[in-house]
Amino acid sequence: MNHTAPASPQPAKPGHPRSEAVAPVTTAPAAGQVAAIRTGHCQCGDIAYHVAGDPIDPHLCACPHDRRISGGPAVLWAGFPANSLRWTGPGGQSAWFSTWPTLHRGFCARCGTNLVSVDDTAPDIVMVTAGSLTDQTGTEPVGHSYREQTPPWAAFTLAPDPTDQAPQPSGAA
Ligand SMILES: [Zn+2]
Ligand SMILES: [Zn+2]
């Protein structure tokens, strides 16, 4: 078996900006805690990956892109340092589809499972689909993007969104 991981987890793109020197960790691990490796894989097993550390900003997103790629009401994303991503399955790196010029979704071309999302405007973090992780501990969502586009029947219990300090309008439908 070939265990050689590609040097970059991202698709080669002309002019794609990528800094290897930026410190990726935005949340400090608890004292004495070692950054644990987490594994994930697609439905068929061709595409597998690992990332390291605790989930960063786990959140649901109900944007139109994520409702399309999942075929569901939202996707639960969990962030990890981008430089910790390694492709470990027999299929190597995922296939890619850009749902926006700066937003690239990695998926298995064989079974269709969506695995990762790379945002050129936030290159330190790779978001992974929480459902593709083997260990989903700590991926309880702390936020919800595009919540106004969530189907009205969907009710999610969320912690307060740390980026939303404004009181909710009482008359909101
Ligand atoms: Zn697959
Ligand atoms: Zn989204």
Image (tube, rainbow, N blue to C red):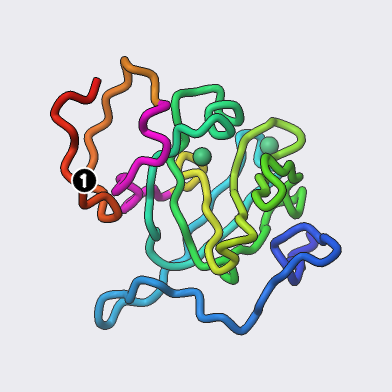
Where is residue 141 shown, x and y percent of the image? 32, 45
Where is residue 163 shown, x and y percent of the image? 30, 54
Image-based side of 127 in relation to 44, left or right: left
- Toward which corner of the image does residue 105 lie, by quadrant? top right
- Toward which corner of the image does residue 26 lie, by quadrant? bottom left
Q: Residue at 74% across / 54% down in the picture?
A: 93
What type of secondary structure mainly makes up the magenta span? Answer: loop
125 in relation to 68, above or below: below
Residue closer to the observer: 62 or 173: 173
The local crowd at label 1, few if under 14, some if 14 to 19, many if 20 or more residues have their Cα within 10 Å, is few
Q: Residue at 31% across / 53% down in the picture?
A: 138
Residue that extends furthest to the right in the rendered view of this protein = 14
167 in relation to 20, above or below: above
Question: Would you name the residue on which mark 1 appears?
Answer: 159
Q: Residue at 42% across / 26% down in the picture?
A: 149
Q: Residue 59 magenta-drawn?
A: no
Image-based side of 90 in relation to 49, left or right: right
Residue closer to the observer: 107 or 87: 107
The quarter of the image holding the N terminus is bottom right
Residues drawn in magenta: 135-149
Residue that extends furthest to the left in the rendered view of this protein = 170
Question: Regarding mark 1 in the picture, which secondary structure is present there?
Answer: loop
28 in relation to 127, above or below: below
Q: Residue 141 magenta-drawn?
A: yes
